[in-house]
Image: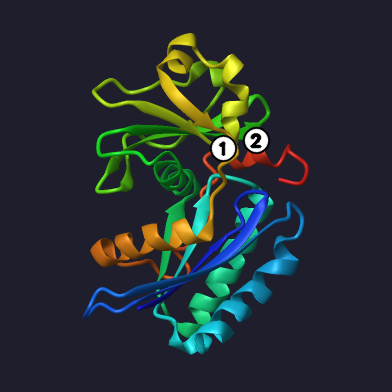
Amino acid sequence: MNLLALDTSSDGCSAALLRCDGGNGDEQLTFRSELAPRGHTRLLMPMIRELLNEAGLTPTDLDALAFACGPGSFTGLRIATGVVQGLAYGLEIPVVPVSSLQAVAAGAIEHFGLPEGDKVAVAFDARMGEVYWASYECRDGQPEALTQERVCPPEQVVLESGAGRWFGAGSGWRLQDQFPLDVVNAIQAVDDGLLPRADRVARLAARSFAVNGGVTAAQAQPVYIRDEVAWKKLPGR
């Protein structure tokens, strides 16, 4: 299977190509990334072309697409959604949407070297005095959701009860001085610089695709969480 994954949901712009041989389990992943808050439109298509050329592939060789569907930058989400939908329509291949929060949780598991049962609380700065928030548990080396994604004021975030250590990840942890004290005290370590990345999106998508398949181009939609009226008030997002 050849899977192309994209992420423009944050200040980072990235693309990844995952090639899997189902017969023997061989896997190759190539990756392009650049931190460019306003450069997504300029960078994304060249990244895609570079990855395909390097692998000796054309778009028609792709079997599936994946993208970080949000939450995140509204402008960025629309860019990735538009590219993925255009490719999926033209190539008639499925799309696997992947949560941006889950992609950061996957990064935290790798960064902290978390064992089975440890947990990650992911927070993104949602602006307007709020954070995007979700919790995950490390299972088979991958983040499994413990809660639904939500947007809320920092003082309303909570951790689920149960065994296992807690770690924090994502830009929203820069607001931890506004989090409840019991949440902050439960966290072993925090990396507030972790961003969604297409290589992690690709691996999460491949796992999801093997179990659930993908969706059609029309069904590949961004996840904003915050309602449309609210996010239109925020310039440039």
Cα separation, mark 1 vs mark 2, equals 7 Å
Location of mark 2 (residue): 230
Q: Give yes or no for contact between labels 1 and 2 (Cβ–Cβ under 8 Å).
A: yes
Looking at the image, residue 11 sits to the left or right of residue 20; the answer is: right
> For the point 52% across and 40% down, which residue is it?
225
Instruction: Give percent across and percent down for residue 54.
Output: 56, 83
* Number of marks present in the image shown: 2
Q: Secondary structure at mark 1?
A: loop
Give the class, few, some or many, for how many residues have Cα within 10 Å of label 2's Cα (few <14, many ≥20).
few
> Percent x, y for residue 141?
30, 48
Look at 57% across and 75% down and name the residue there: 86
- Classify mark 2: helix, strand or loop: helix
For image coordinates 60% across by 55% down, the residue present is 77
Relative horizontal placement of residue 94, taking residue 58 as reference (left or right): left
Residue assigned mark 1: 226
The answer to whether residue 221 is visible is: no
- In which quadrant of the rendered image does the N terminus lie? bottom left
